Amino acid sequence: MKVGLIPASEGQFPVDGPAVAAIARAAEASGFDSIWVGEHVVMPARQRQDYPGAAENRIGPRDTGTLPDPLEWLSFVAGATERILLGTAILLLPLHNPLVMAKRLSTLDRLSGGRVRLGIGLGWSEAEYEAVGVDFRTRGRRCDENVRAMREVWARSPAGYEGELFRFDPVHSLPQPAAGAVPILVGGDSEAAARRAGRIGDGYFPFGKDMDRLAHLLTVMRRAAEEAGRDPDAIELNGLGSRRPEVVERLAAMGFSRVVLFLPDPSVDGVERLGAQAARLVEGA
């Protein structure tokens, strides 16, 4: 079982450069295999929906919290580290142009030696979509097309794409990712997200902690993969971890190969303490 780190405390990420570099280096030295950051382009002052899971006291973004651009933040971390994987959990892919995003990801992936892992999702805030100028109603189709278009330009040069929402004549987009593509993990707790992971994901990253619900979502994901002619066992499972050994053992038995932990104390000492706890947690998993 691998253990990743989300260095956020109550929805806020550190943005002081020296502190971020120190936390990232400590995470690498403490045995974390990956470091993850989420995305909201903006947090509207007037929301029309609550953050999903707020009623269950799950950690969510704060309206005035620090949530940096994920790729800029990970680029900084890449320069401060050597081995740790650089992940988004999650990037709101429908808000982005596929050609621009493909170039940014492939550049970071090449510079970091193939360390990028792209966790994607749709997001929940219609007001955020409106502020950015993207149609909230088409976000699912937009996400799927975005993935196909990015993989097309990563796979060949020149490459073109013709879809409902995105289209471009053959273009060159270089550099391409170190291994030919950036692994894409589909995040989300809905059945739609589970089906998307089965159809097009290299991995699946549900965020819930209800074991019965997780088991159901994995069944949905596996069925969608089989219907798409894919091997469901080849889809990497990532999940939010716990400090309870029985929970980590249950996740391992369900096929999860990585758990990701939030960092309650965003400091070097906090990383080292959590790393020691994580090592004990996964010993029997």
Image: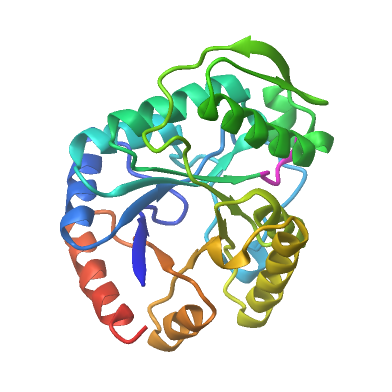
Q: Nearer the viewer, residue 233 or 26?
A: 233
> In the figure, residue 135 lies in which quadrant?
top right
Q: Is residue 65 visible?
A: yes
Seen at 43% across and 39% down, the residue is 66
| Residue segment shown in magenta | 122-126
Q: Quadrant of the C terminus?
A: bottom left
Q: Is residue 44 visible?
A: no
Depicted 27 relative to depicted 43: above or below: below
Q: Position of residue 91 (x, y in %)?
A: 55, 40
* Residue 125 falls within the magenta-colored stretch: yes
Seen at 48% across and 37% down, the residue is 181
> In the figure, residue 104 lies in which quadrant?
top left
In the image, is 250 to the left or to the right of 152?
A: left
Seen at 38% across and 78% down, the residue is 243
Seen at 58% across and 45% down, the residue is 120
In the image, is 233 to the left or to the right of 275?
A: right
Q: Position of residue 56 (x, y in %)?
A: 63, 70
Q: Nearer the viewer, residue 192 or 63?
A: 192
Q: Quadrant of the N terminus?
A: bottom left
* Residue 189 falls within the magenta-colored stretch: no
Q: Nearer the viewer, residue 179 or 87?
A: 179
Most common secondary structure along the magenta stretch? loop
Q: Position of residue 166 (x, y in %)?
A: 74, 22
